[in-house]
Amino acid sequence: MGGEGGLRYAGSVGTGFSEQESRRLAGLLCPLQTPAPPFQDTSAVDLTQPVRWVRPVLGGEVEFLEWTRGGRLRAPVWRGLRGPLGS
């Protein structure tokens, strides 16, 4: 999500990736790696888990049940890239 303060963390997606899609995304995201997070506030990110930050230049589509009270996605599922790369 974006807004006046820039991007805001809304959760992580752990399902919906085929093996082929995972390999494709890895190839697209690897050159976009950056040492700094793209979010203004990372307090909601679980930094005890391995994290790789990337520049936010690709758009993805995620299906989810609802927004939680804390502003997170409930049960997010990856649906694919948006735009020309999603074809």
Image (spheres, rainbow, N blue to C red):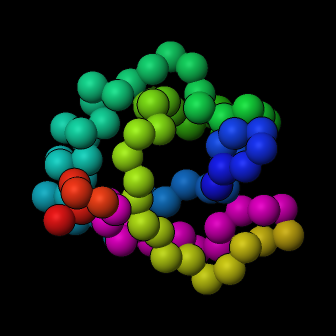
- Read off the magenta span: 70-82
Q: Position of residue 51 (x, y in %)?
A: 50, 33
Q: Going by the image, does 80 lie left or right of 5?
A: left
Q: Quadrant of the N terminus?
A: bottom right
Please tell me whether residue 84 is drawn above or below residue 61 in the rendered image.
Answer: above
Q: Position of residue 72 (x, y in %)?
A: 71, 62
Residue 14 lies in what quarter of the image?
bottom left
Please tell me whether residue 74 belongs to the stretch shown in magenta: yes
Q: Quadrant of the C terminus?
A: bottom left
Picture residue at 41% right of the left edge, 53% below the top? 59
Picture residue at 78% right of the left edge, 62% below the top? 71
Q: Going by the image, does 21 lie left or right of 47?
A: left
Picture residue at 45% right of the left edge, 20% below the top? 34
Please tell me whether residue 76 is drawn above or below residue 26 in the rendered image.
Answer: below
Please tell me whether residue 69 belongs to the stretch shown in magenta: no
Picture residue at 59% right of the left edge, 28% below the top? 37
Depth check: give the residue in front, 31 or 22: 31
Q: Going by the image, does 30 lie left or right of 35?
A: left
Please tell me whether residue 46 is drawn above or below residue 3 in the rendered image.
Answer: above
Can residue 50 be spotted in the picture?
no
Q: Residue furthest bottom?
A: 65
Q: Position of residue 6 (x, y in %)?
A: 69, 39
Q: Going by the image, does 58 lie left or right of 48?
A: left
Can residue 33 be spotted in the picture?
yes
Q: Position of residue 41 (x, y in %)?
A: 77, 34
Depth check: give the residue in front, 46 or 37: 37
